[in-house]
Amino acid sequence: MRRVLSLTLTCALAAGCAMPAAQAQRTAAAAAAAPIEDAEPEVTREVAAALARRGAGAGTAEAALLRPCPAPLQLELLRRSTDGEERSYLYRVRCPAPLLASATYGKNAAIKRLTVQAE
């Protein structure tokens, strides 16, 4: 019985069956999230410019996601958090197919990490 359960769980994880539920929860939470006040518009402009540069690039999945978006990119701040000297921002990118962009600023006030995914 233990082998069957272990094999079933392994197959489910390998097939990606466990992943969509977590992704669906994240997407539903972001979709339900209303934009918050943007107290740092210069950060938003910098993130929008970085996303525009990535969208102009070629051969990446992020470029393919960003290419259909109208210029200039319109961002809505959904969440801002801090962890020590790092600041993290979650934005909704207003495109024909809405996207979520996550940006993390390090202690040197520069973008340390920037990711884009479908909402």
Image: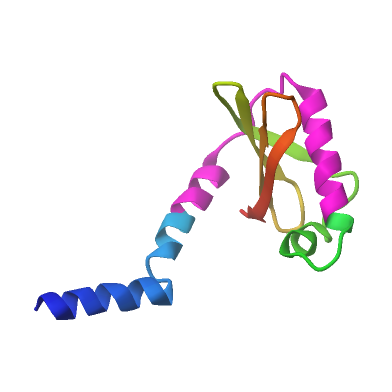
Q: Is residue 68 left or right of residue 108?
A: right
In the figure, residue 34 lies in which quadrant? top right
Q: Residue furthest left?
A: 1
Picture residue at 55% right of the left edge, 44% below the top: 30
Q: Which residues are magenta?
A: 25-54
Picture residue at 73% right of the left edge, 25% below the top: 108
* Image quadrant containing the N terminus: bottom left
The image shows residue 82 at horizontal and vertical percentages of 56, 24
Please say if 2 is above or below 95.
below
In the figure, residue 46 lies in which quadrant? top right
Q: Is residue 40 magenta?
A: yes
In the figure, residue 9 lies in which quadrant? bottom left
The image shows residue 3 at horizontal and vertical percentages of 15, 79
Please say if 86 is above or below 99.
above
Q: Is residue 28 left or right of residue 72?
A: left
Q: Is residue 56 magenta?
A: no
